[in-house]
Amino acid sequence: MTVPPTGTSSTGASSTGTASSPGPAPVLVGCSHGTDSTAGRAAIRSILDDVVAARPDLDVREAFVDVQQPEVADVVADALAHAPAVVVPLLLSVGFHTKVDVAAAVEPPGAAASRPLGPDPRLVAILADRLAAAGLRDADAVVLAAAGSSEPASADAVRVVAEGLADRLGRPVHVGFGAGAHPRVPVAVAEARAALVDDGRVVVASYLLAPGYFLDRVREAGADVVTDTLAPDPRLAAVVLDRYAEQSAAAAAGWQGAGAGTPARPAVAGPGARA
């Protein structure tokens, strides 16, 4: 089952609330950065397809903060006309877009935003599976490659994931960032290579949701092996639904009823930023 277009329900009918929260269930707005990559768009879309498959009762909508349309503020405004809305950032950590674009979109009553998908033990499990699929060997060094952000909390969240992955693998995990934080991925790869012994390789675990600009840069960073991205993977839908559940009550409590939502803003194409 695919995610319905903006403004429609995944079931074609209005969702209902729970006994503790009468009225329509909040719309789940899955908000990603946006990308020019066809493969990246398909990977992100797969997450919401899996959400719809798991919860066909929910109205699930797709939104973006850059590159693609519709913009998250417009999707939220449209949803609030008939139901509360919970924005789940399809992002791996906090950063500019969660603190600015998403935060602004959920200012109207009845809207709420969840925390991003990471850190989460299920992401660590997916990373470990990607490394196994890539043929990780005992002598290999592992580098966790993240997109990066100038937001300190973002780098801290990545390091939490790296620690979880190191515990799971029973070996050290180096960390590299594509932008915003240090060390950058090529530096982390070089440091990992300098510590290799015997016939070990440098294997990068791509801590990225989908193919796009940053995965292309990771592949140019000098590693011997680069894993696939996190998506597609059905476990991501479970994370999304947990994030949605955490904020559903808050969104429902603030909703002012059908027709009370903020009018949608005219769509304005964002700059062609890379993702």
Image (spheres, rainbow, N blue to C red):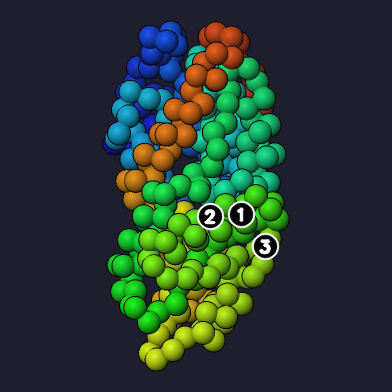
| Picture disc at residue 156 | 1
Whether residues under marks 3 and 2 lie with C-beta atoms below 8 angstroms apart, the answer is no
What residue is disc 2 on? 160
Picture coordinates of residue 125 (x, y %)? Answer: 36, 55
Q: Does residue 34 appear left or right of residue 206 in this picture?
A: right
| Displayed quadrant of residue 89 | top right
- Is 234 or 45 nearer to us in this picture? 234
- Using the image, determine if residue 75 lies above or below residue 152: above
Task: Name the residue beneath numbered marker 3.
Answer: 181
Indicate the quadrant containing the C terminus: top left, top right, bottom left or bottom right. Answer: bottom right
Foreground tag (1 vs 3): 1
Q: Residue at x 68, y 31 (%)?
A: 104
CA–CA distance in space, label 1 to label 3: 10 Å
Query: Picture coordinates of residue 163 (x, y %)?
Result: 49, 60
Q: Which mark is residue 22?
A: none
Three-letter amino acid code at the position of disc 2: Val
Q: Is residue 222 above or below residue 149?
A: below
Quadrant position of the N terminus in the picture: top left
Do residues under tags 2 and 1 come within 8 Å of each other at their CB atoms? yes
Q: Decide which of tag 3 and tag 2 comes sooner along the chain.
A: 2
Residue type beneath disc 1? Asp
**Residue 241 image position (x, y, % from top left):** 40, 34
Asked whether, in this view, residue 187 is left or right of residue 41, the answer is right
- The kind of residue tagged 3 is Ala
